[in-house]
Image: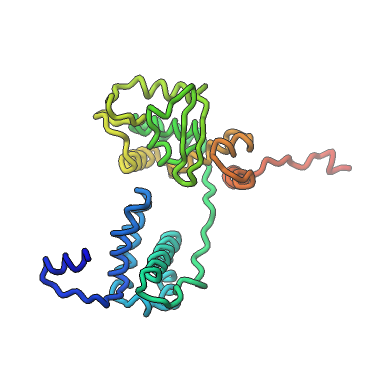
Amino acid sequence: MARRLWAELECKVVDPEDKSFSVIGQRYLREILPTLKAHTQRDYIQYFKLLDAVFGELAIDSIRPFDIAEYLRVRGETSKVRANRERALFSTIFNHARSWGYTDVTNPCIGIKGHREKARDRYVSDTEYLAVYSVAHPTVQDAMDLALCTGQRPADVLKILETDISDGNLIVTQNKIGKKLRIVIEGELANVIERIMAKPRDKVNKALLQDPDGKGLSYYALRSRFDKAREKAGVSFQFRDLRAKTATDTENLAHAQSLLGHKNRNTTEIYTRHRIGDLVKPLSRRARST
Protein backbone atom coordinates (compact mmCIF):
# COMPACT_ATOMS: atom_id res chain seq x y z
CA MET A 1 0.00 0.00 0.00
CA ALA A 2 2.87 2.37 0.84
CA ARG A 3 4.50 1.65 -2.51
CA ARG A 4 1.28 2.30 -4.41
CA LEU A 5 0.74 5.59 -2.58
CA TRP A 6 4.31 6.68 -3.27
CA ALA A 7 3.91 5.73 -6.92
CA GLU A 8 0.75 7.78 -7.18
CA LEU A 9 2.53 10.80 -5.75
CA GLU A 10 5.37 10.31 -8.21
CA CYS A 11 2.93 9.60 -11.07
CA LYS A 12 4.49 6.23 -11.68
CA VAL A 13 2.76 2.99 -12.49
CA VAL A 14 3.32 0.24 -9.95
CA ASP A 15 3.35 -3.33 -11.11
CA PRO A 16 1.65 -5.41 -8.39
CA GLU A 17 3.40 -8.46 -9.81
CA ASP A 18 6.87 -7.00 -9.24
CA LYS A 19 8.83 -9.76 -7.51
CA SER A 20 12.29 -8.33 -7.93
CA PHE A 21 14.86 -8.72 -5.17
CA SER A 22 14.99 -4.95 -4.81
CA VAL A 23 11.25 -4.60 -4.12
CA ILE A 24 11.24 -7.45 -1.63
CA GLY A 25 14.40 -6.18 0.01
CA GLN A 26 12.89 -2.72 0.42
CA ARG A 27 9.88 -4.28 2.08
CA TYR A 28 12.21 -6.11 4.45
CA LEU A 29 13.92 -2.81 5.31
CA ARG A 30 10.56 -1.16 6.00
CA GLU A 31 8.87 -3.89 7.98
CA ILE A 32 11.53 -6.07 9.60
CA LEU A 33 14.66 -3.98 9.95
CA PRO A 34 13.14 -1.49 12.47
CA THR A 35 12.52 -4.40 14.87
CA LEU A 36 16.24 -5.26 15.04
CA LYS A 37 18.95 -3.78 17.22
CA ALA A 38 20.49 -0.47 16.16
CA HIS A 39 23.92 -1.83 15.27
CA THR A 40 22.34 -4.67 13.29
CA GLN A 41 20.24 -2.15 11.34
CA ARG A 42 23.37 -0.18 10.43
CA ASP A 43 25.15 -3.29 9.21
CA TYR A 44 22.18 -4.64 7.25
CA ILE A 45 21.65 -1.38 5.41
CA GLN A 46 25.24 -1.52 4.17
CA TYR A 47 24.94 -5.21 3.25
CA PHE A 48 21.70 -4.60 1.35
CA LYS A 49 23.20 -1.83 -0.78
CA LEU A 50 25.76 -4.27 -2.16
CA LEU A 51 23.25 -7.09 -2.64
CA ASP A 52 20.80 -4.74 -4.35
CA ALA A 53 23.48 -3.58 -6.79
CA VAL A 54 23.93 -7.19 -7.95
CA PHE A 55 20.52 -8.83 -7.57
CA GLY A 56 18.16 -5.84 -7.44
CA GLU A 57 16.49 -6.15 -10.84
CA LEU A 58 16.29 -9.95 -10.82
CA ALA A 59 13.06 -11.77 -10.03
CA ILE A 60 13.48 -13.43 -6.65
CA ASP A 61 12.73 -16.91 -7.99
CA SER A 62 15.20 -16.58 -10.87
CA ILE A 63 18.25 -16.35 -8.60
CA ARG A 64 20.12 -19.64 -8.62
CA PRO A 65 22.55 -21.32 -6.17
CA PHE A 66 25.26 -20.69 -8.77
CA ASP A 67 24.58 -16.95 -8.53
CA ILE A 68 25.05 -17.04 -4.75
CA ALA A 69 28.26 -19.05 -5.11
CA GLU A 70 29.59 -16.54 -7.64
CA TYR A 71 28.70 -13.62 -5.37
CA LEU A 72 30.61 -15.27 -2.53
CA ARG A 73 33.60 -15.95 -4.75
CA VAL A 74 33.88 -12.44 -6.19
CA ARG A 75 33.00 -10.61 -2.97
CA GLY A 76 35.38 -12.85 -1.06
CA GLU A 77 38.30 -11.47 -3.03
CA THR A 78 38.05 -8.27 -0.99
CA SER A 79 36.34 -9.45 2.20
CA LYS A 80 35.47 -13.05 3.05
CA VAL A 81 33.78 -12.17 6.33
CA ARG A 82 31.57 -9.49 4.77
CA ALA A 83 30.72 -11.86 1.91
CA ASN A 84 29.43 -14.36 4.47
CA ARG A 85 27.38 -11.73 6.27
CA GLU A 86 25.83 -10.47 3.04
CA ARG A 87 24.97 -14.02 2.01
CA ALA A 88 23.23 -14.49 5.37
CA LEU A 89 21.15 -11.35 4.82
CA PHE A 90 20.20 -12.49 1.32
CA SER A 91 19.04 -15.80 2.78
CA THR A 92 16.96 -14.00 5.41
CA ILE A 93 15.29 -11.77 2.81
CA PHE A 94 14.60 -14.77 0.60
CA ASN A 95 12.95 -16.64 3.47
CA HIS A 96 10.71 -13.64 4.09
CA ALA A 97 9.88 -13.57 0.39
CA ARG A 98 8.63 -17.15 0.72
CA SER A 99 6.54 -16.31 3.77
CA TRP A 100 5.10 -13.26 2.01
CA GLY A 101 4.07 -15.34 -0.98
CA TYR A 102 6.45 -13.92 -3.59
CA THR A 103 7.91 -17.34 -4.34
CA ASP A 104 7.80 -20.95 -3.26
CA VAL A 105 11.12 -22.07 -4.73
CA THR A 106 13.92 -23.37 -2.51
CA ASN A 107 16.26 -20.83 -0.99
CA PRO A 108 19.29 -20.73 -3.33
CA CYS A 109 21.64 -20.27 -0.36
CA ILE A 110 20.94 -23.79 0.85
CA GLY A 111 23.95 -26.00 0.22
CA ILE A 112 26.24 -23.09 -0.68
CA LYS A 113 28.99 -22.89 1.91
CA GLY A 114 30.46 -19.57 2.96
CA HIS A 115 34.11 -18.78 3.42
CA ARG A 116 35.90 -20.32 6.36
CA GLU A 117 36.44 -17.71 9.04
CA LYS A 118 39.42 -17.80 11.33
CA ALA A 119 38.64 -17.24 14.99
CA ARG A 120 40.07 -13.96 16.25
CA ASP A 121 43.11 -14.61 18.43
CA ARG A 122 44.40 -11.11 19.19
CA TYR A 123 45.69 -10.60 22.72
CA VAL A 124 46.22 -7.02 23.89
CA SER A 125 49.32 -6.61 26.04
CA ASP A 126 49.47 -4.12 28.90
CA THR A 127 52.01 -2.08 26.92
CA GLU A 128 49.66 -1.83 23.93
CA TYR A 129 46.72 -0.94 26.13
CA LEU A 130 48.63 1.86 27.84
CA ALA A 131 49.98 3.15 24.51
CA VAL A 132 46.45 3.76 23.21
CA TYR A 133 45.10 4.84 26.58
CA SER A 134 47.74 7.55 27.04
CA VAL A 135 46.75 9.39 23.84
CA ALA A 136 43.00 8.68 23.86
CA HIS A 137 40.15 11.13 24.46
CA PRO A 138 39.01 11.07 28.14
CA THR A 139 35.69 9.46 27.16
CA VAL A 140 37.59 6.67 25.39
CA GLN A 141 39.77 6.19 28.45
CA ASP A 142 36.64 5.80 30.57
CA ALA A 143 35.14 3.34 28.10
CA MET A 144 38.37 1.33 27.91
CA ASP A 145 38.61 1.07 31.68
CA LEU A 146 34.97 0.02 31.99
CA ALA A 147 35.37 -2.59 29.25
CA LEU A 148 38.54 -3.98 30.79
CA CYS A 149 37.16 -4.14 34.34
CA THR A 150 33.83 -5.70 33.37
CA GLY A 151 34.73 -7.78 30.29
CA GLN A 152 31.63 -6.53 28.46
CA ARG A 153 31.13 -5.86 24.76
CA PRO A 154 31.38 -2.28 23.45
CA ALA A 155 27.61 -1.96 22.97
CA ASP A 156 26.95 -3.15 26.52
CA VAL A 157 29.51 -0.73 27.96
CA LEU A 158 27.96 2.21 26.10
CA LYS A 159 24.43 1.53 27.32
CA ILE A 160 25.30 1.45 31.04
CA LEU A 161 23.23 3.98 33.00
CA GLU A 162 23.74 5.60 36.38
CA THR A 163 20.65 3.72 37.50
CA ASP A 164 22.41 0.43 36.74
CA ILE A 165 24.50 1.07 39.86
CA SER A 166 22.53 -0.48 42.71
CA ASP A 167 23.40 -1.92 46.15
CA GLY A 168 27.11 -1.94 45.38
CA ASN A 169 26.66 -3.77 42.09
CA LEU A 170 26.75 -2.82 38.43
CA ILE A 171 23.74 -4.35 36.69
CA VAL A 172 24.39 -5.40 33.09
CA THR A 173 22.02 -7.03 30.60
CA GLN A 174 24.00 -8.22 27.60
CA ASN A 175 22.54 -7.29 24.23
CA LYS A 176 23.67 -10.41 22.41
CA ILE A 177 22.06 -13.11 24.53
CA GLY A 178 20.09 -11.17 27.13
CA LYS A 179 22.28 -12.50 29.95
CA LYS A 180 21.91 -10.52 33.18
CA LEU A 181 24.94 -9.93 35.38
CA ARG A 182 25.57 -8.25 38.71
CA ILE A 183 29.18 -7.14 38.83
CA VAL A 184 30.41 -6.26 42.29
CA ILE A 185 31.72 -2.69 42.38
CA GLU A 186 35.04 -3.01 44.13
CA GLY A 187 38.74 -2.51 43.50
CA GLU A 188 39.66 -0.94 40.18
CA LEU A 189 36.06 -0.91 38.93
CA ALA A 190 35.03 1.15 41.95
CA ASN A 191 37.83 3.62 41.22
CA VAL A 192 36.82 3.91 37.56
CA ILE A 193 33.14 4.53 38.33
CA GLU A 194 34.03 7.07 41.04
CA ARG A 195 36.27 8.93 38.58
CA ILE A 196 33.56 8.98 35.91
CA MET A 197 30.86 10.16 38.31
CA ALA A 198 33.10 12.96 39.60
CA LYS A 199 33.17 14.65 36.19
CA PRO A 200 30.65 17.39 35.24
CA ARG A 201 27.49 15.59 34.17
CA ASP A 202 24.08 16.24 32.68
CA LYS A 203 21.62 15.51 35.49
CA VAL A 204 18.81 14.60 33.11
CA ASN A 205 20.79 12.22 30.91
CA LYS A 206 21.46 9.06 32.92
CA ALA A 207 24.12 7.58 30.61
CA LEU A 208 27.20 6.69 32.65
CA LEU A 209 29.56 7.58 29.79
CA GLN A 210 28.91 11.16 28.70
CA ASP A 211 30.56 13.65 26.37
CA PRO A 212 31.55 17.04 27.82
CA ASP A 213 28.27 18.45 26.45
CA GLY A 214 26.28 15.99 28.57
CA LYS A 215 25.17 13.72 25.74
CA GLY A 216 25.69 9.99 26.02
CA LEU A 217 28.81 8.65 24.30
CA SER A 218 27.69 7.20 20.98
CA TYR A 219 29.03 4.14 19.18
CA TYR A 220 30.35 6.24 16.30
CA ALA A 221 32.06 8.73 18.60
CA LEU A 222 33.74 5.93 20.52
CA ARG A 223 34.88 4.20 17.37
CA SER A 224 36.17 7.37 15.73
CA ARG A 225 38.07 8.53 18.81
CA PHE A 226 39.44 5.07 19.51
CA ASP A 227 40.65 4.70 15.92
CA LYS A 228 42.45 8.05 16.13
CA ALA A 229 44.16 7.06 19.38
CA ARG A 230 45.09 3.67 18.00
CA GLU A 231 46.61 5.22 14.89
CA LYS A 232 48.53 7.78 16.95
CA ALA A 233 49.85 5.04 19.24
CA GLY A 234 50.79 2.80 16.31
CA VAL A 235 48.85 -0.14 17.73
CA SER A 236 46.45 -2.34 15.77
CA PHE A 237 44.08 -3.98 18.28
CA GLN A 238 40.31 -3.42 18.22
CA PHE A 239 38.18 -2.18 21.10
CA ARG A 240 36.34 -5.50 21.22
CA ASP A 241 39.66 -7.27 21.93
CA LEU A 242 39.55 -5.86 25.45
CA ARG A 243 36.87 -8.43 26.31
CA ALA A 244 39.30 -11.23 25.51
CA LYS A 245 42.05 -9.49 27.46
CA THR A 246 39.82 -9.39 30.52
CA ALA A 247 39.02 -13.08 30.21
CA THR A 248 42.66 -14.02 29.74
CA ASP A 249 44.07 -11.77 32.46
CA THR A 250 41.76 -13.19 35.14
CA GLU A 251 43.77 -16.45 34.92
CA ASN A 252 40.71 -18.19 36.32
CA LEU A 253 38.34 -19.88 33.88
CA ALA A 254 35.41 -20.02 36.29
CA HIS A 255 35.73 -16.31 37.03
CA ALA A 256 36.15 -15.46 33.34
CA GLN A 257 33.13 -17.56 32.39
CA SER A 258 30.91 -15.78 34.91
CA LEU A 259 32.18 -12.32 34.02
CA LEU A 260 31.76 -12.77 30.27
CA GLY A 261 28.37 -14.48 30.64
CA HIS A 262 29.32 -17.65 28.76
CA LYS A 263 26.99 -20.61 29.24
CA ASN A 264 29.69 -23.14 28.40
CA ARG A 265 33.07 -23.33 30.14
CA ASN A 266 34.64 -24.72 26.96
CA THR A 267 33.72 -21.51 25.15
CA THR A 268 35.64 -19.47 27.70
CA GLU A 269 38.58 -21.87 27.60
CA ILE A 270 38.90 -21.64 23.82
CA TYR A 271 38.30 -17.89 23.98
CA THR A 272 41.26 -17.36 26.28
CA ARG A 273 43.77 -19.95 25.07
CA HIS A 274 43.52 -18.78 21.46
CA ARG A 275 44.77 -15.38 22.62
CA ILE A 276 47.76 -16.19 24.77
CA GLY A 277 48.36 -19.92 24.30
CA ASP A 278 48.78 -22.77 26.78
CA LEU A 279 51.39 -22.38 29.49
CA VAL A 280 53.76 -25.35 29.23
CA LYS A 281 57.04 -26.26 30.90
CA PRO A 282 60.24 -26.91 28.93
CA LEU A 283 62.04 -30.23 28.90
CA SER A 284 64.25 -30.54 31.97
CA ARG A 285 67.87 -31.74 31.62
CA ARG A 286 67.40 -34.27 34.38
CA ALA A 287 64.43 -35.85 32.66
CA ARG A 288 66.39 -35.89 29.41
CA SER A 289 69.40 -37.64 30.91
CA THR A 290 67.18 -40.23 32.55
Q: Is residue 186 left or right of residue 74?
A: right
Seen as rendered, the residue at the extreme bottom is: 62
User: Which color mode does the image show?
Assistant: rainbow
Q: Is residue 6 left or right of residue 147?
A: left
Residue at screen point 56% across, 38% down: 247
Residue at screen point 46% across, 76% down: 106
The answer to whether one can see residue 207 in this image is yes
Q: Which one is nearer the viewer's eye here, 148 or 255?
A: 255
Q: Quadrant of residue 50?
A: bottom left
x and y percentages locating residue 120 in the rendered image: 52, 50
x and y percentages locating residue 286 in the rendered image: 84, 38
The answer to whether one can see residue 277 in this image is no
Seen as rendered, the residue at the extreme right is: 290
193 over 61 or under it: above or below: above
x and y percentages locating residue 191 in the rendered image: 45, 21
x and y percentages locating residue 123 in the rendered image: 53, 42
Q: Quadrant of residue 237?
A: top left
229 over 43 or under it: above or below: above
Q: Which one is nearer the viewer's eye here, 143 or 164?
A: 164
Q: Report the label total.
A: 0
200 over 224 or under it: above or below: above
206 over 82 or under it: above or below: above
Residue at screen point 26% across, 29% down: 214
Q: Which one is nearer the viewer's eye here, 258 or 279?
A: 258
Looking at the rendering, in which quadrant would you find the N terminus?
bottom left
Residue at screen point 89% across, 42% down: 290
